[in-house]
Amino acid sequence: MSRRLVWLSLLACVMVGPAFAEDTIDGFQAQRWVADPAKSRLGFRATQEGAQFNGRFHDFTAGLQIAFADGKYSLQQVDAGIQLKSVDTDYQERDDYLVQEDWFYTELWPRATFSSSLISDNGAGNYTADGTLALRGISKEVQLDLQLVIEDNGERGKLLGSASINRLDFGVGQGDWADTEWIGNKVAVEFELYLLRAFE
Amino acid sequence: MDKFSLPARWLHWSIAGLLLIQIPLAWYMVDLPLGMDKLEKYSWHKSLGMLLFALGVLRLVRGLVGSRPPLPAETPRYEKIIAKVIQALLYLIILVMPISGWLMSSAANVPVKLFSLITLPPLIEPDKALVEVFEEVHELQSFLLLTLITLHILAALKHQLINRDNVLHSMLPLVRKR
């Protein structure tokens, strides 16, 4: 074999190698997937005087560990990070207020994070994820209901999820706002993540 | 001039009384920093606004089907026309202003709850640009309303103090006909 061919083969390994970086043990493959930020949506529904209003975060990231074995995908782990400043409730005055001290206090805690610790498979692509949500300096267990759909021969996927959170568990709403008369305690979080395979 | 019927007078003064609360409340609340106090005042403003709308509808229906005492015979024609125009515009603005407010809340994705009892559905989808449009519209309408109220009161006072007829008395409660 000529020296050039050796170099070319080495170069090919370096370039193509990362594409196969997943651990492959006995036909089991651990894959990393990420949410496509352009298409994915992370929203919430809260109540004001008992009447519903909704909002969303524009800036967030989410990653998934998915196991692929025997032609089947199964969710292993979910993590997410949210830039709270990107909150959008269609009303500038309220958005400006939500980032302040009484609410998210983004100056001190700009990000909220979620990391799953236990994923239970409920069959047919449905999962329950128990994990820790860190928000406004408080970390607490929350549960997500998830539905994973992998499409296009494992090229693309979708993760639908929802959770119910008590904002006061995280101190979101200080002082007078700890009273739930005006703004309800329960906040429904809903997301629709368009997934792409991550080749690290 | 004959007196207005009791329901007509009742409606007129209910609306007047509510506007006397509603307009200063609006001025006070808009400059408040966002907080519980502001939410509370806005909630009252919306509730009173929709009550005014309901009273406005009743008044319009009464105006359309009921009869009203004619102005004194000696009133010049142009004065009759001006009075009619101002009154028609007052009806219109009392009916239109609550709607522009409701549209503003809908565009801002802020619920409209009346007297903590009735939740009104949003009229339109949330839209930041439209919030500003309806804010402008609502504010312009408030200037128009104030102008109309001022003209309406000045006209009533003119009847009372210059013409010295009983036009003002025809709408006054509890005052016997002269």
Image (cartoon, helix red, strand yellow):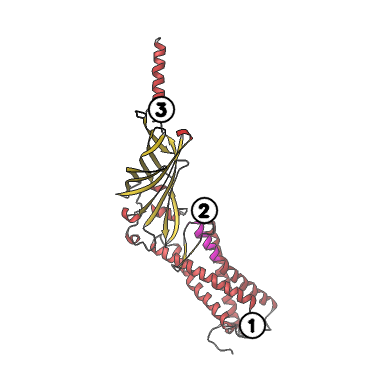
Separation of disc 1 and disc 3 at Cα?
A: 89 Å
Question: In the drawing, does residue B78 fall left or right of residue A100?
Answer: right
Counting the numbered discs, the total is 3
Label 3 lies in what chain?
A
Task: Check disc 1 and report its element: helix, strand or loop.
Answer: loop
Classed neighbour count for the residue bearing mark 3: other residues with Cα under 10 Å, few (<14), some (14–19), many (≥20):
few
Q: Residue furthest top?
A: A2
The answer to whether mark 1 and mark 3 are in CB contact below 8 A is no
Chain-order first, disc 2 or disc 1: 1
Viewer-proximal residue among B79 and B30: B30
Which residue is drawn at the image coordinates 37% and 56% (left, top)?
A: A186
Label 1 lies in what chain?
B
Callouts 2 and 1 in the same chain: yes
Q: Amino acid at mark 3?
A: Ala
Separation of disc 2 and disc 1 at Cα?
A: 47 Å
Residue under circle 3?
Answer: A19
x and y percent of residue A23 in the render? Answer: 34, 29
Give the vertical position of B48 relative to A134 (above or below).
below
Callouts 1 and 3 in the same chain: no
Q: Amino acid at mark 1?
A: Pro
Viewer-proximal residue among B6 and A96: B6
Task: Check disc 3 and report its element: helix, strand or loop.
Answer: helix
Report the magenta residues as a range. B97-109
Give the vertical position of A21 relative to A76 (above or below).
above
